[in-house]
Image (cartoon, rainbow, N blue to C red):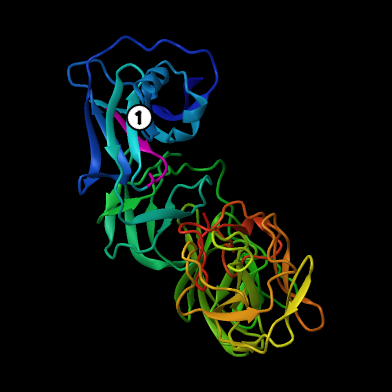
Amino acid sequence: MERVFAAVGAGFWVAFAGCSAPVEPPPLRARPEVLAEPLLDGHLARSPGFRLKAGSGDPVLPRELSLWTGELSEAQLSRLRRGDVPATLVDRAVPALAWAEADGARLRPSVLLQEAARVTLLSASLGKLGEWQVGGGPALERRFPASGAPGAGFALLCGDEAPGGAWELPLEPGQARAELEPGFGSYQGEPCVAVRWTATSAGPFVLPPEIEGFSLDPEPYVAGEGAPEPLLEVECLAGELPLGPLCAAVEDDRLVLTTGSEGLLLRAALPAGVELAPALPGSVLRGFEPDTPQSLAISLITLQGDEVAFEVEFRTAPARVRWVLNEVLANPLGAEPAQEWVELVNASAASASLAGTSLADAGGQVPLPDFVVEPGEYVVLVSDAFGESPQDVPLDPAARQIHLPQLGKSGLSNSGEPLELRAADGSVLSRFPALPAKRAGVSLARRSLDSPDTDSAEFGEHAAPGASPGAPNQLR
């Protein structure tokens, strides 16, 4: 295995692993001065930069640099310097962008580093240049354009929290100027900021490592090919609401996009505040009062940061019940099937009773009781034998339990079986796909309450600590 580099633009390099015969490292040279920044509380930020100043020695070549996670033995370092990458280290290579500067070289990882990880900076000719522990702290992650998608001129960054002040930012490597706009809206419940700049080249453009202690997602922005498509009005189907170049279905408490474009971000002033969503079919704008006239201010933002604003008026449909099978723990660390559970959410704008409904699996169905669930409430379906296990993630204290004689014919299958919530007439109100529960104590979860039942990509393993019974999900 030889470490190979692919050019992104003149003088820029991204490291990845490829296969060829091992090569001998270049002769030893004078070691450069290495500056890792920023250091927060003595630890490396999650989006760091590395400056290498050559001093009186030969210049450091960007293509000979690489970044690795975890502890590296002397034997592993020796093999990496020869370009001989062991299979066990391939997944530990950190994608990075490196470029030459007047007095040396610069390297930036192009992904956020994991909290508490150790990273090693390596030169093929000079060996290990340094090793650092990654700290924690808040981070803002890229939400638009989507990861891997082209874009140069606008970025949407979101996180658990966000900085409150406006900033002028220098983009790397060319030091183009960008402006950060705080309080830009909320994306899937996360507060967001916007960054805008005028692109004078195709890129790459990389945000600075941090502002106000927030690590900024370092994935580069590179312009796509061709001119941006104009925003043209489209003809919608009967009953749909035209939103400029988009169409939406009007429901009781929401609008659901029926058309869309990957190159657009939707920004809407909803009753609960400014919401952001990808302008893709299935995206939802929620929070309206059912069966009432509405006036909505919307703007559409392109990859280049151009923004078109307009207003629409419509009337919402009468309220209806909307149930969502949201999360399933089929493989608990505790006893099976006693510690298994299914999470159900009333995702509608009105209270509703479960009377007449049933939970069905491959072996049959179990009737649910006359249990009233409030709008937005999470309830947990458990068997009569359920008792919280000290090994498993506890139920949210606010979550109510619904006890049933059993969950499924013989409990929930670890190998995966479809679950359905059925109405009294047999119609399906919500589905949960057949996914294998491979890891004990880790639930299978829906990405959001708006994820369609039929899209298995919208379901997966829950993130740490492994489950969130009675609370919103977070996928790995």
Instruction: Name the residue at 50% across, 26% down.
Output: 17
Q: Residue at x 30, y 24 (%)?
A: 128
Horizontal relation, residue 165 to residue 369: left or right: left
> What residue type is disc 1 on?
Trp
Q: Is residue 139 magenta?
A: no
Q: Farthest right residue?
A: 425
Q: Of residues 285 and 244, which is closer to you in this image?
A: 285
Q: Which residues are magenta?
A: 105-114
Q: Position of residue 270 (x, y in %)?
A: 49, 78
Find disc 1 in the rendering and name its residue: 99
Q: How many marks?
A: 1
Location of residue 441 with respect to 7 vertically, above or below: below
* 12 lies left or right of 328: left
Q: Which one is nearer the viewer's eye here, 443 or 247?
A: 443
State the image quarter where residue 446 is shown: bottom right
Query: x and y percent of residue 210 in the render?
Result: 29, 50
Q: Is residue 173 visible?
A: no
Residue beneath the point at 52% across and 13% down: 21
- In the picture shown, does residue 204 fall above or below 348? above
Q: Quadrant of residue 206?
A: top left
Q: Above or below — where is 121 with respect to 217? A: above
**309 left or right of 369 in image:** left
- Kindly indicate the quadrant of the structure image that contains residue 68: top left
Q: Residue 20, image x and y in percent? A: 54, 16
Image coords of residue 3 (percent x, y) = 46, 22
